[in-house]
Amino acid sequence: MKSRNSKQVVKVILILTMLFFTVNLAQAEEPAPLKIGFVSSMTGIASSWAISGKIVYQWVVDQVNKEGGIKSMGGAKVELMVSDCESDAKKAATEVEKMLTLHKPQAMMSVISSPMTKVVLPICQRHKVPMVGIEYSDELYEMNNPFWFGAVPRISTMAKQLSDLFTKTGKETGHPMKRAAVLCQDGAMGEIASDTWGKYLPTKGIKVVANDIYPTGRVADFSDTIAKFKALNADALFCTVTPPESALIVRAMKATDFNPLGYGFSCTCIDTADFINLRKDADFAFGIPVFSVEEAGEKIKGAAAILRKFYSDVTDERDRKLCSEKIVLEKIFAIAVLIHAFEKAKSYDPVVIRDAIAKLDLKTGDRFVHWPDGIKFDKTGWNSRVKAIGGQYQNMKLKILFPGSMVTPGNKPVWPIPKWRER
């Protein structure tokens, strides 16, 4: 009896020992994670961009990991590492240097600010780590940085598209734009937009009566500037500004009773929480780029489905407000570059991953790629396929007005927009 019990004890010990070694062997064989660094403005003037970026990027990382990780790398998980640069370019440089040195990510998402990204790109190049971004500034593509890749339209292109929409609409409605004012933030993106409008509008027969650049984050009230535009009889206003400042500008327009034929933002403004919080005062603004799942969700393969999934998973009301449909799709679109590159590179080497990014050829509807017309980078690092989507709020519903493939039949701009006293 004693002998039988001893044998059973030995058997149990052997089984437990085998399980111990099996579990530890499995753990030892689990591949190391592929790390994505994200240094951005979790606090400060640009925080709404950064916080929404963190939410969307983490959601994509979670989806990839739930679906088995990077399969070509043995199921390696993806890890997002986040650091706050407090909307300060010097701190952005310090934090990127620290992240690349201490944590050694295989790739970086951009700072989501053209001036700050411009500062950190040389650091990424020195460490030979690719950075993918959603910045609009043309200047970033003129740096000849082989480790920079931008997924979204350039600001110069969008500024011209918004100008063309206003010119075309004015002629078609019998209310032509004749005298335009321009108001832009300082830094690369705003200054390029300002320069583009300053040169392009006169070629369309439009006189630019004012072209002002202001210090980002340092103007609490734009009333004096808007009153000047009103006194100059500007009948259109073009802006490239931050989300909080877009709201300040509209408040100043109402306060000074400035009633142009139309006004618009060539930037990520009119679908952010800052602007939408204006409620009815936000109505009739034009913007580019924008997106509406109600208007264009079924026109972009997979867009409606992935937005439904995102908003089903992200239940915090504050997070949902920060993440408009366009912001979600655009940021998913950007991090998709890295997910596809990880799969194709089959390597932890950032240079190999960089080369995989440069060779990507992705179509709308591919995994996480839900923006027209897919992804293909040129020699400057720009996604030369991407199209900008423009529209206008009408009764606080975003109506897509271009490109033609996205427009619902019957959609037309409201022009002239209603005067403040008529709303």
Image (cartoon, rainbow, N blue to C red):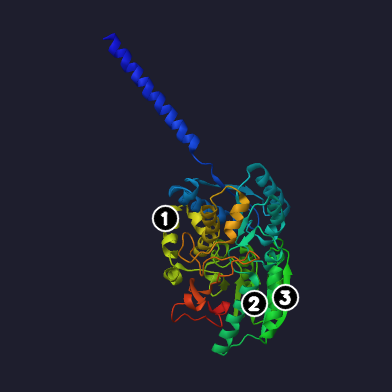
Q: Residue at x 69, y 75 (%)?
A: 196
Q: Quadrant of residue 210?
A: bottom right
Q: CA distance from mark 3 to mark 1?
A: 43 Å
Quarter that holds the N terminus: top left
Q: Is residue 143 left or right of residue 5?
A: right
User: Are dots 3 and 2 in contact, CB under 8 Å?
Assistant: no
Q: Which amino acid type is shown beneath numbered disc 3? A: Asn
What x and y, as percent, mark residue 39? Answer: 63, 51
Q: Residue at x 53, y 50 (%)?
A: 346
Q: CA distance from mark 1 to mark 2?
A: 38 Å
Q: Residues within 10 Å of mark 2 (few under 14, many from 20)?
A: many
Q: Quadrant of residue 287?
A: bottom right
Give residue 368's mark.
none
| Nearest to the observer: residue 242 or residue 146 | 146
Q: Which residue is mark 2?
A: 237
Disc nearer the start of the sequence (3/1) = 3
What x and y, as percent, mark residue 132? Answer: 60, 58
Q: Quadrant of residue 256?
A: bottom right
Q: SS at mark 3?
A: strand
Disc nearer the start of the sequence (3/2) = 3
Q: Which amino acid type is shown beneath numbered disc 2? A: Leu
Q: CA distance from mark 3 to mark 2?
A: 10 Å
Q: SS at mark 1?
A: helix
Q: Residue at x 67, y 62 (%)?
A: 114
Q: Is residue 51 left or right of residue 12?
A: right
Q: Is residue 75 above or below residue 409?
A: above
Residue 233 seen in this snapshot? no
Give residue 312's mark.
1
Q: Which residue is mark 3?
A: 211
Q: SS at mark 2?
A: strand
Disc nearer the start of the sequence (1/2) = 2
Residue 276 seen in this snapshot? yes
